[in-house]
Image (cartoon, rainbow, N blue to C red):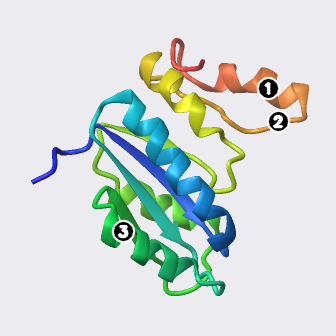
Amino acid sequence: MPQAPEISIVLPVHNEAAVLIETLPAVRSALESIGRPFEIVCVDDGSADGTAALLDDAARNEPRLVPLHLTRRFGKEAALAAGLEAATGRAVILMDADLQHPPALLREMVRSGPRVLVANAVRSAAVMAAIPAALPAGRCA
């Protein structure tokens, strides 16, 4: 029986079959290099391009891959919520499946400990200035 995961990666996906061929091995490799038990929760948000079949096939060979399939397209936020609900790790990291969030940074994220990480491109200086003020002290990195 595999160990309970310490780290859960949640990947919302929609019509990502072409990129998942690269993403899943990259995320798995980065997590294996950390040396802690993990799971990769992939939430298919109603894809029509073979994403669901690719995830199911990959999960047959990788027990740490947890595919979830939404019945139709609900949107990224609903897919993230479903992934968060299904995640069983002590730490959960949300990533985009298109490698916008580089898997190579996972080691540093885990090493630096629990924090709220904003890993998105934000173009407005006003928004960036407001983020630390909106979070409790010591919770923003």
Extreme residue in the top direction: 138
Q: Can residue 77 be seen?
A: no
Disc 1 secondary structure class: helix
Q: Which residue is mark 1?
A: 128
Q: Nearer the viewer, mark 2 or mark 1?
A: 2
Q: Which residue is mark 2?
A: 122
Q: Are marks 2 and 1 in contact (CB under 8 Å)?
A: yes
Question: Which of 84 and 8 lies nearest the eye of the viewer?
Answer: 8
Residue 59: mark: 3
**Left or right: 101, with 59 as reference point:** right
Disc 3 secondary structure class: helix
Image quarter hosting the N terminus:
bottom left
Would you call the spot at circle 2 few (<14 residues within 10 Å), some (14-19), or many (20 or more)?
few
Q: Earlier in the sequence, mark 2 or mark 3?
A: 3
Residue 23: image quadrant is: bottom right
Amino acid type of disc 2?
A: Val
Disc 2 secondary structure class: loop
Q: Earlier in the sequence, mark 2 or mark 1?
A: 2
**Left or right: 81, with 45 as reference point:** left
Q: Are marks 1 and 3 in contact (CB under 8 Å)?
A: no
Would you call the spot at circle 1 few (<14 residues within 10 Å), some (14-19), or many (20 or more)?
few
- How far apart marks 1 and 3 lie (CA) works out to 38 Å
Q: Nearer the viewer, mark 2 or mark 3?
A: 3
Image quarter hosting the C terminus:
top right
Q: Can residue 17 be seen?
A: yes
